[in-house]
Amino acid sequence: MKKQHNTIAVLIGLFILVSTTILSAQEYALTISVIDEESKDPLEGVTVLITPCDCGGISNTSGIFSKRLQKGVYNLSIEYLGYGTQRLKVDLNKNQSISVQMPVEEEQLSEVVLLAKKRNQNVESPQMGVLELNIRDLIKVPTALGEFDVLKSITLMAGVNSSGDISNGVSIRGGSLDQNLMLYDGAPVFNPTHLFGLFSVFTPDVISGVDIYRANIPAKYGGRIASVLEVKVKNPYVDRLKIEGGIGLISNRLTLTMPILKNKLMLIAGGRTGFSDVLFPLLIPRLKNTRANFFDSTVKLLYLLNSNNQIAYTNFISNDFYQLDLISSVENIISSSNQYDFKTRNHTLKWLHTFENNTNLINRLIHSTYTPQNLFPEVDSDNIIRFESQIQYSSIQSEYSNAKTEDLSYYAGLEVKRYQINPGTLDPGNGNTINPVSLNKEVGFESSAYFNLDWKPLPRMALSGGLRFTQFSLLGPFDEAQYTPEGLFNGVTTFESQELVKNYFNPEPRIGLNYKLSEDTSIKMSYARIFQYIQNIYNTNTPLPTSRWKISDRYITPQKNNTYGLGLYKNFLDSQFEFSAEGYYRKTENNLTYRPGADFFLSRFIENEITQAEGKSYGVELSLRKTLGKINGVMNYTWSRSLLKTDEVRPINRINNNEWYASDFDRPHTVNATINFEGDQFNSFSFNFVGQTGRPFTIANGIFEEQNVVIPIYLYRNNSRLPTYHRLDFSWKIAYSKDPNRRFKGDWIFTVYNLYSRKNPYNIYYTQRNGGEDGNVFLGSPLGAYELSILRGALVSLSYNFKFQ
C-alpha cells in the first residue's frame, strides 16, 4: 500500500510539473493590422520587430502580420519607408488584435511617389511592367477643368496612351481599349469614362490607389490580354466623422467617412455630380445646344466581425446623359439629335479571413451591369426611337494566400465568371417608319483555377511564377449560322437553353525573373500568355454606346496574347533617382476589327461584318524618376509600334491587301513628363508635358461622282497620320490652413490645361466644297479636308477642396 501511495505521489508531482511547464509556455496569437493613417489603405511589406524575443516579420498584401508568442510583455517597433515609426508595448495574456495607423512623414518622402513601397522595390521585385500609384500621386496631376482623374493621370506613364483629348479608355502597349481589364474594388467596369472620355467614372475622394500590370500579369487576373488596371477603394478605418469634398466648374463632390458601430461597422460614401450644359458651347461653339450631365457614387461598408474576419460591401453607380445637336442617320432613322444614356451598377462583397502565421482566405461575390442606350428623337415628330444593349457579369472567387517567409509566398484560387450579353433591341416607339428588332442574348461561363509562387532561391535572384487554367463555354439558347466552304450562307442551327454551343480550354503560364547585379541594379525577364473571351467591336476612334460587345463563339475565336519582356533597373543616390529601361514584344492573335463597309449595328450574324487579325506590338520604354527633394517628378520616353495583318481569302474582306498596317493605337514616339515644385507648406506647383506621334487615320485614295455628289474612295486603312500631338498643363495648389491640428482644412487648385493653346487635331474629315471656298488651299479639288479639334484653346479652372475630421 505504501508503495502504491509513493507511485501516486510521483504521478501527481509529474502532473504538476508538466502542467506548470505547459502553462508557463502557453502561446497566444498576436495579430497586427497596418494601414495608412490618411487613406486607410492596408500597407504591405511593413517591418514588425519584436523584443525581447528578437523576432518579427512583414505584413502581407492585406496589411496583416500574425504570430504566436508565449505569454509575456513585448515591445513592438513598426517601420516603413516614408512613414513615422510606431512603437507599442503589448502585455500578451490572451489572443490580441491590434490596428496600427502609420502617419506619413512628408519630409522623408515626396508626394509624387508611391508612399507605400519598400526601398528598392523596383529593383528587387520580379514583377515587370507594374505601376503602383497612391492617391497622393494622382491628385498632383493637372487635368481638364481641375478634376482629379485616374485615366488622365496614368496616360503620363510610359507605355500608356489615349486616342486624344476625348477617349473612352486607354491603350496600353499598343493594345485596343477593350483589351484592358479595368476593376473597381474587384468589379469590372465596361465603360470607364464620363462625357465620351473627358473624365473617368471613378469617384475621386474614395480612391486609395491604382495598380497597373502590363507584362507578367499575376495569375489571379485573367480575361483581358493587354493589361490590368485595378482601382482600389479606401477601407473606412475611422473612429470619428470625416467629411471631404470639392466645388469646381464642372462638378461637385462630397464624401462622408464615419463609424456606425464603434470598432465594428464603418462606412465611406462618396458622390459626384456634373452639369456641363453651359461649358460645352464655350469649349465647342458649334455644339451650342449640347446637353451633358453625369453622376457617380461609391458606398463601402466594412464590418469587423472579430480579429480574424472582415466583411466589406462596395456599391458603385455611374450614369451619363448627353445630347449632341447633330442631325444623324442610323439604320434608316432620321433624328434631329443624338441622345446617349448609359448606366453602370456594380456590387462587390468580400470576406477576408486571416489565419495565423500570415495566411489569408479571401472570398468575393461580384455582380456588374452595364446598360448603354441611344435615343433618337425623330425629325418633325414627338416620337423617340430607342436602342438599348446590356452586359450582365457575375463572378465568385475564392483565394488562399500564404506568406511563409520574406523569401517565399504563394496563393491559389478558383474563379467562375458568367457573362450575359444583350447585343441590342430597337424600339420604334409609336412610329411606323422602322420595324422593332431584338437580337438574341448570349450566355457564357469562364471557369479558372490558378496558382502563383514568389520565391527568392538566391540572395541575388527572385522568381515569380504562375499558371492559370481557363475553360470558356458558350451556352444556348443560341442561333448559329452555317456556311458553305465558299463562305455562302447555308441555314441556321438552333441550340436550346443550357445546351453547349462551343467550348475552349487554355492554359495561361506567367513567369518573371529578377537577377540583382548589385544592391541598386537588376535585370528582369518576363513572359505571359493570356486569352480573352469578350470583346468590344466598334468602327470609330473611341467606342460609342452603339458599339457591340461579343463573347467568343465558333467563328469569333478568343483573342490570344504572348508577351515577352526584358528590363534594366537602376537606382542612384540612395534611391532618390530611379531609372528603368523596359523592352517588350507582344504577339497577338484574333484581334477584332471591322471589314470594309461593315454595318454591325443590328447585324444578326456579326461574323459577316468583322475579321480577326494577327497583331504584333513592340517597343522600348525609358523612365527616370526623382523621388525626393523640393523638385521631383518623372520623365518617360517610349518608342513603340503596333501593327495588324488580316489573312482573308476573299479580296473584298481584306484590309490593306492582307499586308501589315498601323493599328489605331500605333504611336511610334511618345514623350511625357511631370515636374513638381514643392515651394513651401502653402504652395506647390506642377507641370505636365505630353508629346506623341499623331494617330493613324485613313485618307481618301480617290473620288467618284454620283448624282452631282462627290464621294471619296478609301482603299487603304490608316494610310496617313494626324499632326504630332503635344500639350503642356499647369497646376497650382494653395493650402491656407496654417494650423496642422485644425479639424477643418481647405485648399484651392488653379489649373490650366493645354497651357499654350495647342489645337491638336482629333480627326480629319472631308466635305464637298461650295464654289471657290478655300481655293488657295484645295485648288481644283471638289472636296475639302478639314481638321476637327476638341480643344481650341487653354482650359482655365479653379476648384475648392475641403476636409473636416
Image (cartoon, rainbow, N blue to C red):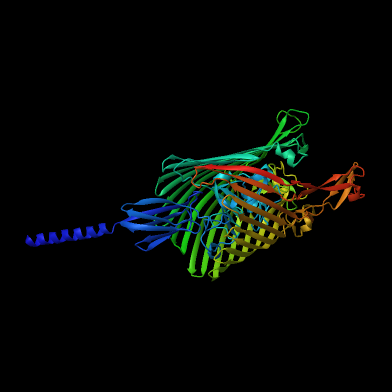
**Residue 402 sits in which quadrant?**
bottom left
Q: In this view, does 484 lie to the left or right of 749?
A: right
Instruction: Pinpoint residue 710: horizontal percent, then vertical percent.
Output: 88, 45
Q: Is residue 788 visible?
A: yes
Q: Is residue 447 left or right of residue 542?
A: left
Q: Can residue 427 be seen in this view?
A: no
Residue closest to the eye, 407 or 658 = 407
Query: Which residue reaches farthest left?
Result: 1
In this rendering, the answer to whether 296 lies above or below 626 is: above
In this rendering, the answer to whether 282 lies above or below 131 is: above
Residue closest to the eye, 202 or 662 = 202
Instruction: Pinpoint residue 735: horizontal percent, then vertical percent.
Output: 58, 47
Q: Is residue 265 left or right of residue 559?
A: left
**Residue 679 sits in which quadrant?**
bottom right
Instruction: Pinpoint residue 138: horizontal percent, then vertical percent.
Output: 59, 51
The quarter of the image holding the N terminus is bottom left
Residue closest to the eye, 442 or 495 = 442
Query: Which residue reaches farthest bottom?
Result: 517
